[in-house]
Amino acid sequence: MPKKNKNRLYFESLRLERWPRSLAIIPGFVAFVVLNPDYLKNNDLLLLAVKLFAAFLLTLFISTANYIINEITDATSDAFHPHKKDRPLVKKEIGKTILIGLWCVLVAVSIIAALIFYENRFFLWDLMALLAAGLLYNVPPLRVKDIPFLDSTLESANNPIRFLIGWHIVSTAFPPVWLLISWWFFGNFLMVGKRVAEKKFLSEEESSGYRLSLKKYSLKALIAFMIFNALVFIVSYALFAVQSGLHTFLFAIPFILFYLAMFMRKSVQDIEGAEEPEKLLKNPYFAAYTLFLVVIFVLAYIFR
């Protein structure tokens, strides 16, 4: 068997295929523009596009740094996962030293670039919050990843943090609280769905060895928690729409509920789709319905 290229193995460990998750900054940017429609008229659109793209790259750098930490701290437990056991670090095909060096470079570049190109210091703090969330989630002794219910709640905190990054590209203010809460609980809904799939499709030895918190969950408790997050998401979304005067956005709720039901059904049927939600967009039905939802929101905004 030919020897694998080490550079390629290190590249695989960065998990750059998950770059779409960093696009989660865009809703924050869009939300600000929707709530402040005159902003685009009074600003340089090309400069805004450049700042948005740069913010995406810096978010990707910090997310990649977090994946590196996850790669290192989870190497032992990933050996119990049917797919993750083949990761290069788990198989000892690469070492930790270079990965730690890459982590330092990514964090340093992100901090320096944020200080140079973004006057709004909230932007830098948002990036640091994203980094801190990754450390708290993965690194002992706290390692929230092993604590039931807190594990998904902290992991999904990446959702509102990325939202804040997008928002603070253009604003020094804080977004509406109910909007931020709804975005957080939507993320938690997805993260709990991931755990439902793991609990259902992994053996007892695999699940408890791979994710310690799964040992303390029951499938019923996970499904109940998933429903709870969906309800909080919908209620907080409705409160945001009412408080912001965007009453037409309330008409999207039935369509959103159907979308949540589609994902919930998927999480109890297929581990791959729930573990990597962005892969669902490769499904033509999910992709078409996602586009349909976008159209619903655009129409709701036009006729607000």
Image (cartoon, grey):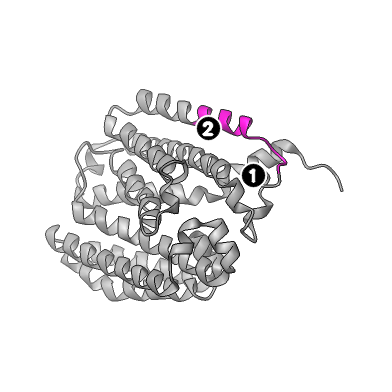
Mark drawn on residue 103: 2
Nearest the camera: 266 or 147? 147
Which numbered mark, 2 or 1, is in the foreground of this view? 2
Classify residue 155 as left or right of residue 170: right
Q: Please state the horizontal and vertical placement of residue 56, each as a whole percent of the image.
A: 43, 41
Of marks 2 and 1, which one's residue comes earlier in the chain?
Answer: 1
> In the image, what residue occupies the spot 29% across and 27% down?
119
> How far is mark 2 from mark 1, CA to CA?
14 Å
> In the image, what residue occupies the spot 44% across and 73% down?
219
Regarding residue 85, the answer to whether it shows in the image is yes
Residue annotated with mark 1: 12
Regarding residue 281, the answer to whether it shows in the image is no
Where residue 165 sits, quadrant-wise, is top left
> In the image, what residue occupies the spot 66% across and 49% down?
87
Nearest the camera: 283 or 49? 283
Mark 1: secondary structure = helix
Nearest the camera: 132 or 293? 132
Q: Please state the horizontal and vertical placement of residue 290, each as a whole percent of the image.
A: 42, 67
> In the image, what residue occupies the spot 87% across and 48% down?
1
Q: Amino acid at mark 2?
A: Trp
Q: Which residues are magenta?
A: 92-106
Is residue 289 positioned above or below 188 on the image? below
